[in-house]
Image (tube, rainbow, N blue to C red):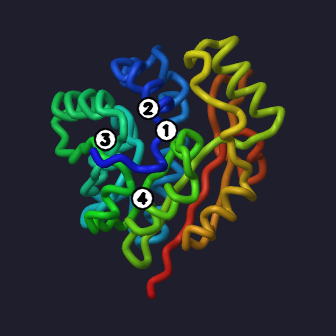
Amino acid sequence: MSATNTVDPSEIAKFEAMAAEWWDLNGKFKPLHMMNPVRLDYITSQIAAEFGRDLTKPNPFKGLRILDIGCGGGLLCEPMARLGATIVGADAAERNISVAKVHAAQSGLDIDYRFVTAEALAADGEQFDVVLNMEVIEHVADPLGFLTACQQLLKPGGIQICSTINRNPKSFGMAIIGAEWIMRWLPKGTHEWAKFITPDELYKLIENAGLTPVDRKGFVFNFAQFTWSISDRDLSVNYVTTALKATA
């Protein structure tokens, strides 16, 4: 794998250590498994709207080439493959890719998993209709450099869907004290509050990378019901954005 200045080795080490647990519903990635249905609702609706696809039909994403950068164990790659997309899953943690390949084979899915960075893919001239950039940017060393590489990977008219965690006292309480210290869903130190990015900061970074932000929503956890939902207004902790690349 080519070395790049956006990869943070200490962050990669965290996820290497947890790689074997990607598909354990009650393991260290339990929060992502719980969040995955609302992530998928948002992702599929944005892709369908942009490319005029009918989600009620078989293989609605057939003909679309999708990159999941920072794919982990493949929690998003597998449903995208089932929807008919040609999917490339890329991750800078080699053990994640090994786990993802095994699980895809067990599931009978054809997914192109690669131990590679966004910058290396861009340098090779790879192009995609969609780049999924989910819960990654808070772990990189150079957010603008990373987003610029993602922009280069998009075909004209393509879309990037990017999610992360807001930076404020509530996010510290929920994502770090709550998820890591109290619930112990994640090992202590998985997230660094100083690396969290506010929605306005992310919009500016996306624009500086050469994309046009067009939407943002919140992912909200309800402790009473122990469920996630999508919110038009509440971006106080987890949130997601969609951005377009100009056609010319």
Front disc: 3 or 4? 4
Q: CA distance from mark 1 to mark 2?
A: 6 Å
Residue 156 rendering spot, x and y as whole percentages? 41, 78
Check disc 2 and give the amino acid type. Answer: Ile
Label 2, on which residue?
12
Q: Residue at x 31, y 52 (%)?
A: 83
Q: Earlier in the sequence, mark 2 or mark 4?
A: 2
Establish if 152 lies above or below 241: below
Label 4, on which residue?
131
Q: CA distance from mark 2 to mark 4?
A: 20 Å
Check disc 3 and give the amino acid type. Answer: Glu
Q: CA distance from mark 3 to mark 2?
A: 22 Å
Label 3, on which residue?
78
Q: Are marks 3 and 4 in contact (CB under 8 Å)?
A: no
Q: Secondary structure at mark 3?
A: helix
Label 1, on which residue?
8
Q: Residue at x 20, y 28 (%)?
A: 102
Camera-side residue: 41 or 168? 168
Q: Are marks 4 and 1 in contact (CB under 8 Å)?
A: no
Q: Earlier in the sequence, mark 3 or mark 1?
A: 1
The image's mark for residue 26 is none
Q: Residue at x 45, y 34 (%)?
A: 9
